Image (cartoon, helix red, strand yellow):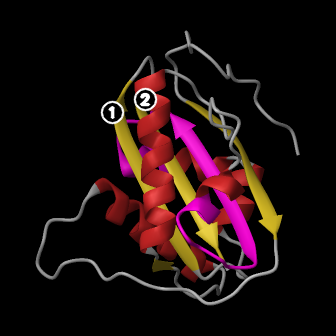
């Protein structure tokens, strides 16, 4: 899978970018879910989950459930990238997506992550991810059961997105 080179420190580019999705298979356990509040306006994160599940339905995969631990890991990573002005699957402190997800207490056996920067809406970031083979593979991986999505504004790209997947 080809990856798009991206700065791991002070980002200077401002056009939207995505990095190839990453996947890991680990020993693990059960999932926990969190339901969206009834009758509330959907957040960007909830809209992305809906868009992911619509794509999965087209290929016969079951819908992913939102997991609070994955959501915390994804949100923290998006916020960190925006605040500290970088774009990478690896945090500036050297932590991988697996380490960030495990730190939130998620113990599933399969993990994956997609990130993107510069896309202003859930539909635009999803369109970009679906055009990228690595990201598309994560989104359409039927072995995943759960998802957490993060979104943060700021930094040189203006918007940072993270999808963390678990199974």
Q: Disc 2, disc 1: CB below 8 Å?
A: yes
3 part of magenta stretch:
no
Give the residue at x 61% y 54%.
Answer: 100
Measuring from the top left, give residue 162's x and y in whole percent: 52, 49
Label 2 – label 1 distance at C-alpha: 6 Å
120 part of magenta stretch:
yes
Image quarter of the C terminus: bottom right
Give the residue at x 46% y 75%.
Answer: 67
Give the residue at x 36% y 58%.
Answer: 45
Up-down: is 103 above or below 155? below
Residue found at the very far top of the displayed protein? 12
**What residue is pinned by disc 1?**
153
Give the residue at x 51% y 44%.
Answer: 77
Up-down: is 105 above or below 78? below
- As helix, strand or loop, the secondary structure at mark 1 comes to strand
- Residue range of the region highlighted in magenta in the rendering: 101-126
Confirm whether residue 123 shows in the render: no
**What residue is pinned by disc 2?**
82
């Amino acid at each position: 899978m080809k990856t798009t080179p991206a700065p791991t420190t002070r980002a200077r580019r401002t056009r939207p970018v995505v990095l190839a999705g990453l996947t890991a298979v680990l020993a693990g356990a059960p999932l926990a879910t969190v339901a969206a509040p009834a009758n509330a306006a959907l957040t960007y994160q909830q809209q992305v989950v809906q868009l992911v599940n619509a794509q999965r339905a087209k290929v016969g995969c079951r819908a992913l459930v939102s997991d609070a631990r994955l959501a915390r890991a994804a949100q923290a990573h998006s916020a960190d990238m925006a605040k500290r002005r970088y774009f990478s699957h690896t945090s500036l402190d050297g932590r991988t997506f697996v380490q960030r997800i495990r730190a939130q207490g998620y113990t599933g056996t399969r993990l994956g992550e997609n990130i993107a920067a510069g896309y202003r809406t859930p539909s635009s970031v999803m369109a970009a991810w679906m055009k990228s083979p690595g990201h598309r593979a994560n989104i359409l991986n039927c072995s995943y059961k759960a998802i957490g999505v993060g979104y943060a504004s700021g930094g040189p790209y203006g918007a940072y997105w993270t999808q963390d997947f678990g199974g």
